[in-house]
Amino acid sequence: MKNSSLASVTLTTEPVTMKISAERMPNVSTLAPRTVTTRLLCVTILATLCLVLVLPGTALAAGEDVWYAMGVTVYDLEEGKEPTLVMASQAREGTELPVDVAIAIPKGAEVLWAGQILGGDPAADPQLEATIDTGTDYDVLRFTLTQSLIAQIEMAMPQDWITSTDDGRRIGVEWTSAGLVDRARVAITVPLTYHLEDVVPTSHVEVRPNDVLYSAETSPVAAGQTIVLSGVMVEGPAPELIAMMSQADEESADSTSGTGSAGVQPIRASDEPTEDEGIDTTWIIVGVLGAIVAVLVVVIISRSRADDTLPQADEEDAEDSSESSEE
C-alpha cells in the first residue's frame, strides 16, 4: 500500500502541484492596490515628517523677514536710573495685518513692556502679548501685529553691556539679527553733562534737548549678522554741544549789539514808561506754557522713543515714497 501510494503520488505530482499552486497563489488584482496603498501611505508619512521639520523654520523666516527698519537704543544712563534698552521695529509698507512676527533680543534680557505704536496718545498704545523662545546666541520674541506696523519693546539693559573703566563706564551695544532687515541702527544716548569717547565704529552725533545721541546705521542687515556700537561715557559735555553753545553765545551777542547777520533788531523797553505799567503778564504766560510743555514731555517720553530709535529714511527713500503715493 505504501508503494502504490507513492506511485500514485508520483504519477499525480505535476497536476497536484499545478492545482496547489493555483489555489495558494495570491490574487494579483488584490495585491496590486494594496501595494500602491502602502507606498502612498509611506510617501504621505514621509511628506508629513518633512513638513513638520520644515514648517517651523519657514514660519520663523517669514516672521523675521518682514522688517523694514530696526532700532536698538540705550537710554537712562543718568546716575540713579536703571539703563533701559529700547527696540523699535517697523514692518515693510504693504504688510497686511494681522501678521505674526519675530524679533531677536539679547539673550536673557528682561522685557519690561512691549506694544504697538499707534502714533497718538501713548496711553492708547496697545500692549502686546509676546512669547520668548530661548536660543543659543540670542532669544526670539514672538508676537502678532494687529493695529500698527510699528512695535516697541522696552527691556532692562543686559548688565554685561556696562563695564567700569578708569575714565568712566564703557557701554557696549551688540545686536544680532535673526532675519533680513532693510536697515538697522544701534545707538547710545548720554546725558548732556556727559559724552562718549573711543566710539567704535565711527558714529553720527546728534545733540538733542535732553541728551546726546551717538548712532551707527547698517543697511541692509543679513540674517545672523551682528552690529555693534561701543564707547566710554565720561563726564563733561560733548564737543558738539560746546560748539553749539559757543555759536549760540555769539549769535546772542550779535543780536544784543544789533549787528546780527540777519539784521534783527534787539527788543528794547519803551523810552517813555507809563505811570502805572501794572504786572507784566508776558512772563506769566511764558511760565505757564513752559510748565505745560514740561508735563507733556514727561508723559510722552516713555512711549515716544520709537521715532528716535528707528533709523530715519534718507532723502532717496522719501522721494520714492512720495512718488509711490502720487502714483
Image: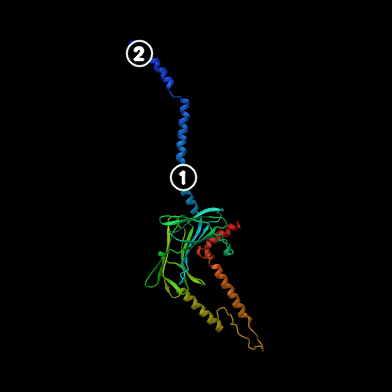
* Residue with the most extreme right position: 275
Per the model, the C-alpha gap separating discs 1 and 2 is 62 Å
Side of 267 relative to 135 (left or right): right
Which residue is tagged 2?
A: 10
Tell which of 178 and 256 is nearer to you.
Answer: 178
Q: Quadrant of the C terminus?
A: bottom right
Q: In terms of secondary structure, where does tag 1 sit?
A: helix
Residue lying farthest to the left in this orientation: 3
What element does badge 2 sit on?
helix
- The image shows residue 129 at horizontal and vertical percentages of 52, 56
Quadrant location of residue 268? bottom right
Q: How many marks?
A: 2
List the residue tagged with mark 1. 52
Disc 1 residue type?
Val
Colouring scheme, one of rainbow, by chain, secondary structure, one colour: rainbow
Name which of mark 1 and mark 2 comes first in the sequence.
2
Above or below, 99 relative to 277:
above
